[in-house]
Each structure stands twice: as structure tokens, then as C-alpha cells.
Image (cartoon, rainbow, N blue to C red):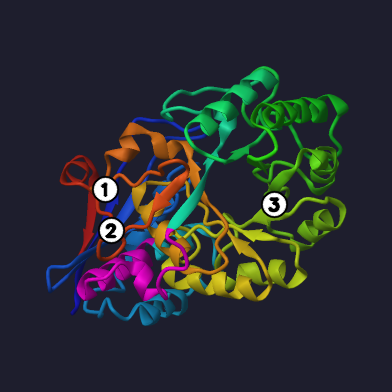
Amino acid sequence: MKITSIDIIDVAGDFHSATSRWRPSVVRINTDEGISGYGEIGLAYGIGASGGIGMAHDLAGLLPGMDPMNNEAIWEKMLRKTFWGQGGGGIFSAAMSAIDIALWDIKGKALGVPVYKLLGGKCRERIRAYASQLQFGWGNGREKAMLVEPEEYAAAAQAAVADGYDALKVDVLAMDEHANWNQRDLKGPLSERVIDLGYRRLRAMRDAVGPNVDIIVEMHAFTSATAAIQFGQRIEELGVFYYEEPVMPLNPTLMRRIADRVNIPLAAGERIYWRWGYRPFLESGSLSVIQPDICTCGGITEVKKICDMAHIYDASVQIHVCGGPISTAAALHMEAAIPNFLIHELHRFSLLEFNRKMCTNDYMPVNGHYEIPEAPGIGQELTEETIASATVISVR
């Protein structure tokens, strides 16, 4: 089997996230045996999608004529034969990821098995999920709710629990008292006013759902180490499941500093790339939960290695998912196969009608749990209607 062409598909919707247009982008690799594989460039939100599309186009030029079953050789070629690849970075790694996922999709289809079987088979029959980003409300995903008052946070938590989730994630600091998202400075020592508002929001959620619902506190790395320690110590009594991205990942020693001072498990990883990026966090023991995104961290080939490396250090895995349905499908296969899986992220954007109609299958949890896809490959493809309305760049 040989790769004949690669399509880079810009699936831009009309929905806008808090920072930018919602813009999933997908790579489709085609072969001389008529099998095509799909992978997602994990830059659907924030600024960066156009960079990922351009990088995928450049990397695609390496592929024609290669055997798509040789994913290890192709991954290494992308890393070593591009010069800039060895410098890493999210844009480069996201483009690699989409190509790698598409190769695994081809492999599974060619062999007639779901990808999880190629990764070692099932370690579990269902995938527990949590409702993510409740500071924007909970519902069908389209409402641009900006929650301010503690009772609004409590109502969103109750709505998610009513939908069957027994785990939630929320950022209670970044929304100011005027419903402005990520507009105030959370670096350095925080004022008591800011800390108290975040505490009361989280307290209201805990009181509303009781002690048997896990609550993850998301910080988005908006806080510096000092601020993260202040707030983390204040919320310890509320039974936080884990404390996510309390500080940016570019200085691993800061994460260790927070871990030494806050008695809550720390999580991070959506902006950490490849084994080399994870190594200092695992060796220092600062992270209890790692959160690699398969669509930005090097694809299935690389993330499986990262998860196995984390297992040596007793770190659990929550795959980061904030993208289109191809991102979700790839995550479910990895989560089914690894022994150190913890929980799956269901971002509220996954509930968008645009997202749910983008692909051939609508994988959604029932009572807070996903079934594992059983179709060959990753079990997810763009619909013909989605492709027809998208911008497509082809490399032959």
C-alpha cells in the first residue's frame, strides 16, 4: 500500500469561542488501495488554526509514495528530516498529530479492527467522562453564558449532574464580576476580593452537588505560581479532584513548587508536547494527572509512549479533548487501551450542533459514560456534506 495524496480540510463553523472562531481542521490521507484515513489538527480554538493547516500542508509533501502502515518511520521522518521539527512546538506537533492519527485510521481499516485493538486491547468496557468548562454554563453548547454569581455556578453544576455526570470541571477565577472572561490580571499575589469570589463560586457548586461528585478546578495557566498557591490553599477543604494548569508549563520547577505547597493533586499537559516535554514533570513528581492532547502532542504513536512513560511514575491520564469528533474518537481508543486512564473530558463545545453533525458518527456519553467505538480504524470520518462546504487543499 502506498500514500497517493493528502487533503487538508479547513472545517470552519460559524460559532465563536471565547477567543476565536471555532475552526476544526482535518487531514485525510488517501492510498492506492482506496483506503483513506482521517486525523485532526488539534487547534480548533484560540489563535493557531491557520498555522496548523499550513504546517500540515508542508509536512504532507514528505508522504506520497510511503507505506502508511509504517507509522513509526513516518513519525521519525517528520521529526528528523524537517530541521524545524526537532525544535518542537504546538503548531508543528499538531500537524504531525493529524497525520499520525490518519495513518492509524488507515491501519485499522486495512486490518479490519478498531485502533484500540492495535494498542493492546481493552482495559475497560466504558469510558467515564466529566462535564467541562461550566463557567460558560451547561446545555447544548451554543449559549454564550458568562456565569458570575455563585448561584449560577451551582445551577450549572446541577444541570450537568442531571445529565448523568458525576464529575465536573470549572474555572472559577478567570470570569470577573462583570462577566468579562480572562480580562483581569491573575499574576502575582491575588487580592482577597478575587480569591473570595472564586471560593464562593466553588463552594456553591460543592454545596449544590454534594460530596459524591468530583470537581476539577481549572486554572488555564492564567495564574502565576504565587497566585496558584494562594487559591489552591484556600480551596483545599472543598474536596477538589485535581487542580489543572495552575501555572504555565514552560518552567517545570514552578509546578513542583506548587505541588509542595498545595494539598491537591496537580494536572497539566494540553500545552506540553512529546516525551521530551513530559520528562521533567514526571521525573520531579509534580503532576499526578497528565493531560496530553492526541491532536497536538504527536498523535497516537507518541501519546501511547507518553502514557506508558507516565505509568512508571504512577501518573494517571486524562486525554485533553477540545476539538471536533475526530479528536474525541482518537481519545476514546487511547483511553480504552491504557491501564492508567482516569477520566475523559467532554468539553461543552462537543455539544455544539455544528460539531455533532460534522462527522459520520455522533459519539456521546450516556449517563456520563462513553461506549468504545468498534468500527475499523478510529471509527470517525467527515461527512460528504462537511467536506463539500469546507476549504480543501490537496497534496499529490
Work out whether residue 149 can be spotted: no
Q: Which amino acid does label 3 sit on?
A: Met
The label shown at residue 4 is none
Q: Which residue is drawn at 55% across and 62% down?
A: 341
Q: How crowded is mark 3: few (under 14 residues within 10 Å), some or many (20 or more)?
A: many
Q: Tell which circle, 3 or 2, labels the residue nearer the N-terminal end.
A: 3
Above or below residue 311? Residue 319 is above
Residue type indicated by callout 2: Gly
Whole-angstrom CA distance, mark 1 to mark 3, is: 35 Å
* Residue indicated by mark 3: 248
Amino acid type at circle 1 is Asn
Taking the magenta stretch, the answer to whether it contains residue 219 is no
Q: Position of residue 188 (x, y in %)?
A: 83, 40
> Residue 10 vs residue 260: left or right?
left
Residue found 55% across the figure and 53% down from its top: 343
Q: Label 1: how many residues lie within 10 Å, few (<14), some (14-19) or many (20+)?
A: some
Which picture quadrant has residue 224? Answer: top right
Please identify the quarter of the rendering in which residue 352 is found. top left
What percent of the width, then of the height, locates residue 146? 57, 23
**Regarding mark 2 in the picture, which secondary structure is present there?**
loop
Location of the N terminus by quadrant is bottom left
Q: In which quarter of the image is the C terminus?
A: bottom left
Image position of 293 with respect to 70: above or below: above
Determine whether the residue tagged by mark 3 lies in a helix, strand or loop. Answer: loop
**Pointers 1 and 2 in contact (CB under 8 A)?**
yes
Say the numbered circle drawn on residue 379: 2
Residue range highlighted in magenta = 98-125
Q: Which of 377 and 340 is in front in this view?
A: 340
Picture coordinates of residue 287, whole percent (x, y): 71, 61
Mark toward the viewer: 1 or 3:
1
The residue at 19%/78% (across/down) is 2
State how far apart marks 1 and 2 are (Cα): 8 Å
